[in-house]
Image (spheres, helix red, strand yellow):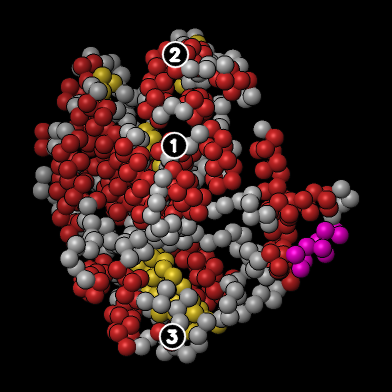
Amino acid sequence: MDINNKGDLTLKAEDYLFALPEGEEEAVKIGLEYWFDSGNFTNFSDGLVNAAVSSGYNGKPDDRPAVCQYILHIADKAGIPLEKEKRNIQNWLNEKNPPSRNQAGRDTVFRICFALNMNLPTVKSFFRKVYWERPFNFRDISECVYYYCFQHGYSYVHAKEILKKVELEQKGKSSEEFTRMIPEKINAFLSEEEDDKLVQYLAQHYEGKYEAYGTGYMVMPVFDGHTYENVTDASPLDTYKTVRTLTEVIRKYHDAGYLHLDIKPSNIFIYPETREMILLFDFDSVTPKEQIRTAKLLSYSQNWAASEQLISSYHHKICEATDLFAIGEILFYRIMGRHSEINERRPFSIYSFPENIRKRDRIKLTEIFRHTLCANVRRRWQTAQELLEKLDDLVAEQELVSTHLVPIEPFIGRERELDEIARRLKSNRILILSGIGGIGKTELAKHYADSHHKDYYDVIVSATFDGSWLSLIVNDSIIKITHFERFPQESPEEYFFRKISKLRELCSARVLFLLDNVDTSVFEDKESGFWKEIISLDCHFLITSRATDWEYPVLEVMPLHEEDDLLKLFKIVIINALKAMMLNLWIDFL
């Protein structure tokens, strides 16, 4: 049964409704009607394109890279920082995944709304029908200010100016419930001349900093994510990016006149969307540089601390390079899977790297370790900027980027097929999943990739075959290599072969290409030559197709037969439909 097929669902709906207690049947019917009314829901990709068109985009709606460029362009003109979200926006437009529902995701969506010059009713509609989220959380001071600015047509820059004033004026008090009373208060401020009144009101009710019994307290929001010690890097590039972002944060500490002195994975919070933004917390170790020599007690964690922190007679040597040691130790631990040893903390130490670290990366990592882990403080780099420049070189290396599509949930059954795919790909580079249309080949392949990527693959590239191998490979939004793009005068064929040559360098047994909807009838003439170049890449291929006449191993995907799996799947669909209905009714009520 296809959970996205209304016909399949309604075939079973009546049987299930009869099993419901009296009174719930009508609620489920209403929920199903609401669920299947296309006017109530829009996927984020189409909704964002429609919003761009409404704001003035006059290009082709299907040209998603152009839509992304338009959004970034108007955001830049309006002084709205969105460039770092380029990759996320591209993924959203290509229907790879929607924005997350955490605070970082919500703030990005609000910035997009500002860039597209939406008014308050349009923002509310966009959140409810496109983002599927409650529009404004009035317990969040930033969203209170956004509400005020959308209401009066003020810019994002104006919103940030207000927030800066609130930070200066806030008095650490907290009283009123930030629910319906807050928007009523905000609505009373009718013009830009009343900004100061808004600032004073929000500052007085800002839930953040408190003092009691001689101790300062800070209330921090709950984020969707994990501390770095509980996060597994999908590839070395993820590690490089995270450490680079950490170094940038520490550079700002140093520029402001502070040393952190207790940098460790448990103090680093990782957002699921990106490694280009982290949250560094636990501030009790932070010390002004000028107080290092007079401080009686300095906080540190032994496994991540430099020698000048561990030996009290060396405390006078503590400086910016002390923080760089901790960063180097974190990088070493993530790459090697262990802490560095004494003989690896010398100016000319030699390191034995894991197999997944490329040779050209090993040279750069060796230089970084020698200049961050060195026991002699004077032999380390003295500024975070020096380390940043070397990390930039690592991050800038050309990498094949994962474009793995998240499978639709719920995924029920198919355990036998998943085990069989894993077994066959251990002894074969190429496996074909064959079956009739709608049988679930694509979701099975996506679920295999999603559940096995940490064990078997560093990179997963997902692509839907559109009838041309040439166009698929030259499309940089599908097959993306960092810092690698088509030259202005380069023909598609020339770029195809240059890109294939680069893929030969980057591909390995730790790379999986998931190619969807491939038809063997197109392997003729020139396309046949392109296909041979692709399939010769030294990586794994999992291919879905309706055809069975392949020269490679074929696994036929059959319909679900287990009654328990079918019943479980159907019940989940009905329950999700009911939840969606109740959520939207509650949002509309609010």
Location of residue 296 (image quadrant):
top left
User: Is residue 413 or residue 285 the one in the foreground?
Assistant: 413
CA distance separating discs 3 and 1: 47 Å
Quadrant location, the N terminus = bottom right
- Pick the residue in front: 272 or 523: 523
Amino acid on which disc 2 is placed: Glu
Reading the image, the residue beneath label 3 is: 520
Check disc 1: other Cα within 10 Å, few if <14, some if 14-19, many if 20+. Answer: many
Badge 1 marks a residue whose secondary structure is loop
Left or right relative to 494: residue 403: right
Compared with 349, 432 (above or below) is below
* Eye-nearest disc, 2 or 3: 2
Which quadrant holds residue 283? top left
Q: How crowded is mark 2: few (under 14 residues within 10 Å), some or many (20 or more)?
A: few
For the point 83% across and 51% down, the residue is 26
Between disc 3 and disc 1, whose residue precedes?
1
434 above or below 356? below
Closer to the camera in the image, 73 or 128: 73
Distance (Cα) linking label 1 and label 2: 21 Å
Measured along the vertical axis of the image, is residue 51 above or below residue 450? Answer: above
Read off the residue under disc 2. Answer: 193
Helix, strand or loop at mark 3: helix
The secondary structure that most of the magenta stretch takes on is helix
* Callout 1 touching callout 2 (CB < 8 Å): no
> Of tags 3 and 1, which is closer to the observer?
1
The reply to whether dot 3 and dot 1 touch (C-beta < 8 Å) is no
Disc 2 element: helix
Which region is colored magenta?
Answer: 10-19
Relative to the observer, which residue lies in front, 44 or 233? 44
Which amino acid type is marked by label 3? Answer: Thr
How far across and how far down the image is residue 38, in percent? 64, 55
List the residue tagged with mark 1.
117
